[in-house]
C-alpha cells in the first residue's frame, strides 16, 4: 500500500474510530495530514467529555491548528470515517481546510444532505474512500447498542 495514499490515511482514521468504539463512543475517527505528515489524530469524545461538540472533526481541527500554530489549514487534508455533519462542516469552512476525504456517507445528518450547504470554495471533497469498512464499524456499534 502506498503510504501517502488516501486509503493509507483513511486506515489511520479508522484506527481512531476503533478507539472511540472501545470507549463506547460513536466510532468516528479523524486525522489531519499536512504534506505527508499526520499532525492531528482524534475520535469522538462526546460521551467522555459530556460535550455535544466533541466530534472527531472538531477535535482534529483544534489539534491541527495548535500543532501548526494557525487557525487556517489550507495546506491540510482531513480524513474522517463518516461524512461531516453540519456543525463540523461549518468548522471546516472557517478553517479553510484544503481537502476533506471521508469514508461512509451519512444520508441523514451529513452536510451534503443540506442542499444549500457547502464547504469553503477552495476545499476539495472526496467521499466514499473505504466506505464499506467505515460503515461496517458504525453498523456493528449500533447493532450492539440495540
Image (cartoon, rainbow, N blue to C red):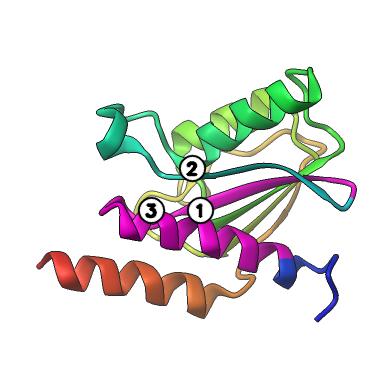
Instruction: Measure how far apart labels 1 and 3 are at the Cα level.
Output: 7 Å
Instruction: Measure how far apart labels 1 and 2 are at the Cα level.
Output: 6 Å
Q: Is residue 33 magenta?
A: yes
Q: Position of residue 17 (x, y in %)?
A: 46, 58
Element at badge 2? helix
From the image, which quarter does the N terminus lie in?
bottom right
Would residue 84 be seen by someone viewing this image from the given angle?
yes
Q: Residues within 10 Å of mark 3 (few under 14, many from 20)?
A: many
Q: Quadrant of residue 131?
A: bottom right
Would residue 106 be seen by someone viewing this image from the given angle?
no
- Assess whether mark 3 and mark 1 are in contact (beta carbons under 8 angstroms): yes
Q: Which residue is mark 1?
A: 29
Tell whether 20 sits left or right of 125. left
Q: Which residue is mark 2?
A: 56
Q: Residue at x 69, y 31 (%)?
A: 64
From the image, which quarter does the C terminus lie in?
bottom left
Above or below 18: residue 78: above
Q: Residue at x 25, y 38 (%)?
A: 47
- Assess whether mark 2 and mark 3 are in contact (beta carbons under 8 angstroms): yes
| First along the sequence among labels 1 and 2 | 1
Tell whether 84 sits left or right of 60. left
| First along the sequence among labels 3 and 2 | 3
Q: Is residue 12 magenta?
A: yes
Element at badge 3? helix
Q: Residue furthest left?
A: 146
Magenta region: which residues? 9-35
Q: Residue at x 44, y 54 (%)?
A: 28
Amino acid at each position: 500500500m502506498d503510504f501517502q495514499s488516501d486509503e493509507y490515511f483513511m486506515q489511520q482514521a479508522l484506527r481512531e474510530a476503533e478507539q472511540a468504539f472501545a470507549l463506547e463512543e460513536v466510532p468516528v475517527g479523524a486525522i489531519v495530514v499536512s504534506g505527508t505528515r499526520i499532525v492531528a489524530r482524534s475520535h469522538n469524545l462526546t460521551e467522555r467529555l459530556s460535550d455535544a461538540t466533541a466530534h472527531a472533526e472538531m477535535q482534529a481541527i483544534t489539534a491541527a491548528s495548535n500543532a501548526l500554530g494557525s487557525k487556517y489549514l489550507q495546506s491540510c487534508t482531513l480524513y474522517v470515517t463518516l461524512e461531516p455533519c453540519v456543525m463540523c462542516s461549518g468548522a471546516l469552512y472557517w478553517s479553510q481546510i484544503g481537502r476533506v476525504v471521508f469514508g461512509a456517507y451519512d444520508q441523514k445528518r451529513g452536510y451534503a444532505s443540506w442542499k444549500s450547504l457547502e464547504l469553503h470554495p477552495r476545499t476539495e471533497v472526496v467521499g466514499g474512500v473505504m466506505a464499506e469498512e467505515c460503515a461496517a464499524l458504525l453498523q456493528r456499534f449500533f447493532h450492539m447498542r440495540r
